Image (cartoon, grey):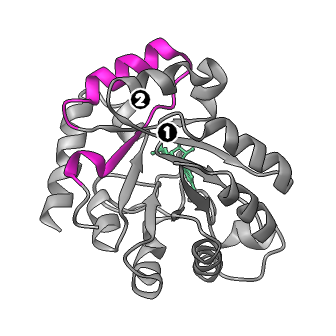
């Protein structure tokens, strides 16, 4: 994982409404980072326009639409995304769903979403799940890898066990990144949070960062600070 260049370690989540806003953010960040995430909000607002623009500009794109449906539908959705320059896409589901996605991926790398970083133990109980978050993340990651996924999305708190137990090949992409002390801010929806440095030290290959960069007065200062943390580990 040390072969990943520093400017691809931080994936900036372009959580904005319009292609214009997304393009302005890319331009503001691209001197330091070359990896951008397009999620539900922006995709609903611009379909593939922004995705194609970012790819044409020479940057990498993680398309985070978390496909979750019956296997055939997921397979057909993955076919819409592959072979158009997108680097990573996210899927979710059980073995048949993952197998269907893998069968259609083409040049696309697939990440299985394990447990959303906004979920804590209480949320698991409320959904009727008895396993701990850590156990479920590990179980889902092992299955995803065995079924041919390239990696997973998890919080930095689970990264170390996965890196040790599942090897070097697995991509571990970690949202829920918050700068400074790892104290949860109750006004924020993220629950399982760590700093960028902690995530990489624990074995994450990439971190996904949205609001700490996109809402900052000086996004480059935040990115540079996180990159310094990453270099130090
Ligand atoms: O603003 P913030 O840094 O919390 O943004 C995190 C981004 O990562 C959001 O775009 C969110 O959709 C995404 N994400 C996440 N947890 C996951 C998968 C994706 O927060 N498990």
Q: Nearer the viewer, residue 106 or 6?
A: 106
Task: Write down the residue under mark 1.
Answer: 86
Could you say whether the residue bearing mark 1 is in a helix, strand or loop?
Answer: loop
Q: Is residue 105 left or right of residue 5?
A: right
Q: Is residue 14 left or right of residue 136?
A: left
Please provide percent x and percent y for residue 107: 52, 48
Please provide percent x and percent y for residue 86: 49, 39
Residue 197 falls in which quadrant of the image?
bottom left
Q: Nearer the viewer, residue 127 or 144?
A: 144
Tell me the magenta residue range.
5-32
Could you say whether the residue bearing mark 2 is in a helix, strand or loop?
Answer: helix
Q: Is residue 6 left or right of residue 191?
A: left
Q: Is mark 1 within 8 Å of ligand 1?
A: no
The answer to the question of whether label 2 and label 1 lie on touching residues, with beta carbons closer than 8 A, is: yes
Please provide percent x and percent y for residue 167: 41, 81
Q: Nearer the viewer, residue 204 or 167?
A: 167
Position of the N terminus, as image quadrant, is bottom left
Residue 183 falls in which quadrant of the image?
bottom left
């Amino acid at each position: 994982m040390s072969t990943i260049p520093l400017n691809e370690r931080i994936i900036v989540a372009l959580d904005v409404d319009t292609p214009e806003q997304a393009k302005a953010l890319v331009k503001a960040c691209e001197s330091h980072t070359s990896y951008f995430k397009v999620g539900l909000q922006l995709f609903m607002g611009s379909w593939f326009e922004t995705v194609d623009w970012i790819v044409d500009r020479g940057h990498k794109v993680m398309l985070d639409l978390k496909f979750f449906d019956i296997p055939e539908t997921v397979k057909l959705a993955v076919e819409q995304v592959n072979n158009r320059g997108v680097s990573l896409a996210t899927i979710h589901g059980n073995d048949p769903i993952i197998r269907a996605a893998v069968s259609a991926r083409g040049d696309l790398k697939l990440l299985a979403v394990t447990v959303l970083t906004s979920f804590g133990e209480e949320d698991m109980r409320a959904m009727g799940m008895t396993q701990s978050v850590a156990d479920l993340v590990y179980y889902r990651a092992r299955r995803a890898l065995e079924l041919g996924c390239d990696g997973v999305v998890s919080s930095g708190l689970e990264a170390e066990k996965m890196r040790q137990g599942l090897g070097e090949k697995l991509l571990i992409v970690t949202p829920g990144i918050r700068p400074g002390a790892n104290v949860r801010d109750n006004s924020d929806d993220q629950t399982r949070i760590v700093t960028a440095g902690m995530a990489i030290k624990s074995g994450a290959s990439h971190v996904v960062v949205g609001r700490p960069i996109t809402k900052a007065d000086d996004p480059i200062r935040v990115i540079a600070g996180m990159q310094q943390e990453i270099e130090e580990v």
